Image (cartoon, grey):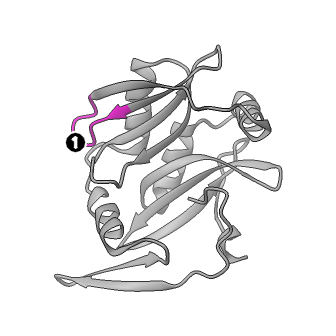
Amino acid sequence: MKRNIVIATLTAAALVTGGTVAAFAAGDDEATATRRQANTSAQVTAAEAIAAALKHTPGKALSADLDDDGADVWEVTVVKGDGSGYEVRIAPDTGKVLGTQRDTEDDHDADDRAELAAVKGAHTDAREAALAAAAKGTVTEVGLDDDNGTVAWSADTVKDGRQGEWKVAPDSGKVTQDRDDDA
């Protein structure tokens, strides 16, 4: 998922291991790409991780990320009604809550306020966006993305060893391919 970084050129590299071919965008080192691919075997889906996080910490889910730093956990960001943010860690094999940490680094800038407003007015939440994107592959990350003032859900998927990036409209749940990285 883009994190406010404009990628001028994307290249694909194929990693052949045991007859499995996996394509990864430039910028992922081999170890990170291999972990991301391995994490797609998680038994708990993004939608299930979000549901577990919200059951534990009620609020609005803003994102879910299948952590690829070797910790092998879902990290779900939840914002409560008072604006306080929390990271809820979910086991990818059982769906159990492993811990919750308050996000004290949230700066609530204009982009953050726009994203929160978009979530409040949306017909589609993060769980529904993950469910919609799951038709395109195994969802490894879902969250809000603000491109040129337009807020939409963004989802990363893996299917048949290939990564995909998708936009999910907050009002309709319509899934389209994310072509913003082509610029």
Kind of residue at disc 1: Asp
Residue at the far left: name it.
18
Which quadrant, please, contains the C terminus? Answer: bottom right
Residue bearing mark 1:
93
Task: Label the magenta part by its dominant secondary structure.
Answer: loop
User: In the image, is residue 33 part of the stretch drawn in magenta?
Assistant: no
Image point (50%, 59%), residue name: 156
Q: In this view, does 27 lie to the left or right of 113?
A: left
- What is the crowding at mark 1: few (fewer than 14 residues within 10 Å), some, or many (at least 20)? some
Image point (43%, 61%), residue name: 137
Q: In this view, does 140 lie above or below 93?
A: below
Across and down, in percent, residue 73 comes to 31, 43
Of 4 and 151, nearer the camera is 4
Magenta span of residues: 89-96
Q: Is residue 74 above or below residue 10?
A: above
Image point (58%, 81%), residue name: 10
